[in-house]
Amino acid sequence: MKIIQVTDVHLGRRGEIRYGANLHERLDRCVDHINTRHGDATLCVFTGDLTEAGEAESYADLKSALGRLTVPYRLLPGNHDRRANLIAAFPDNPIDDNGFVQSAFDTPEERLLFLDSLAEGRVTGELCDNRLAWLDARLAEAAGRAAYIFLHHPPVELGLTLLDPLGLERPRRFLDLLARHGNVRYIFFGHVHRDIAGTVDGIPFSAQRGLHARFMLDLVGDEVVEQAPPAYSIVLIDGARVVIHSCDFLENWPLWSPATGERVR
Ligand SMILES: [Fe+2]
C-alpha cells in the first residue's frame, strides 16, 4: 500500500508571499507532482495546519486545489486550523461521534487511524478523554492487524528547545494507551516543519517538514525560519515493512548520463 503524507500546507490569503513563498502555488505544484508520479497511491493524508488562520476562504481555496488531486485524501486539523470551518468546507471528510476530525481507514491487513489533536486557542496539541476513548476502541477493533497513526502534534520530545513545549499535551496518556494495545507500528506527524525520525517506547515515528518554510535546527533569537525546499512523503506499507521516501517536489537538479558522462538536462 502506498500512502502520501503532506503536511503543514498553511494556506493563507490568496497571493500572499510568506517567507518568500506563495503557498497556493506551492500546493498546486505538489498536487501536480503527486498526480503525475503517485496517482497509484491508496490515500493522501494531510497531517494538519491545512490553513494559516483557519479562515473559511482558505478552506475553500484548499478544496479547490484538492479538487484536482486524483488520489483520495483525508484531512487532519493542526493548531492553525479551525475545526468548524474545516468540517463545513469538507463535509465528506469523516468525523467521529463527538465531532472530532478522527477516522479509520481499513485494509484486510492494516488499520490507519487519523487523530484530531487540535486544542482550539492553543499551539500545543490535545487528545482529550473522548478522543482517547475513540482511539482505544478503534485499536481494540484492530486487534490482530497492524495499526498506523497519523496526527499533527508530536507525542514525544524531539530535542528542539523551543518546539518541545509546543507538542502534544500529556503524551504519556497517549503512549500508554498504545502500549496497552501493542499493535501500533508507526506514528506519523507534522507540526515541527522538519524531517525527524526516531522511536518512542519502541514505536517508530517520523515528522515530515511539509510545504511551509522549515524551522531551523537551532532556534535562537528571531532567526528561526529558513526557506528550505518543500517536500511530501511517499509511505510504503505492507505486512512486514514501512518505508518512507521524502520527495522534494520543486527540485530540478541537472541530470547526467552514466553511459556517456554527458549532461542531459
Ligand atoms: Fe505548521
Image (cartoon, rainbow, N blue to C red):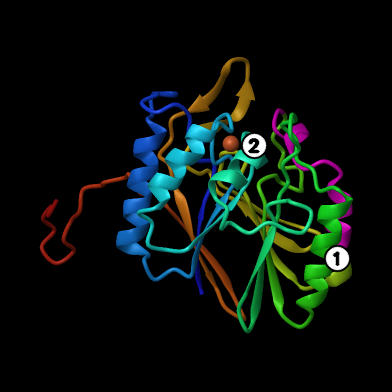
Q: Which residue is mark 2?
A: 82
Residue 50 in the image: x percent, y percent?
A: 54, 41
Q: In front: 110, or 184?
A: 110
Per the rendering, the mark at residue 179 is 1
Labels 2 and 1: the sequence-earlier one: 2
* Type of amino acid at the residue the image marks with label 2: Arg
- Asked if the residues shown at circle 2 and circle 1 are in contact, with their CB atoms under 8 angstroms apart, the answer is no
Instruction: Name the dominant secondary structure of the magenta segment.
Output: helix
Q: Looking at mark 1, is its residue's CB closer than 8 Å to ligand 1?
A: no
Question: For the residues carrying marks 2 and 1, which lies nearer the camera in this image?
Answer: 2
For disc 1, the neighbor class at 10 Å (few under 14, some 14 to 19, many from 20) is few
Q: Secondary structure at mark 1?
A: helix
- Per the rendered image, the range of residues in magenta is 162-178
For disc 2, the neighbor class at 10 Å (few under 14, some 14 to 19, many from 20) is many
- Where is ligand 1, by quadrant? top right
Q: Secondary structure at mark 2?
A: loop
Residue 143 in the image: x percent, y percent?
A: 79, 79
Query: Height in image: 147 above or below 96?
Result: below
Q: Please state the total of marks drawn on the protein image.
A: 2
Which residue shows up at 66% across the image and 46% down it?
152
Q: CA distance from mark 2 to mark 1?
A: 31 Å
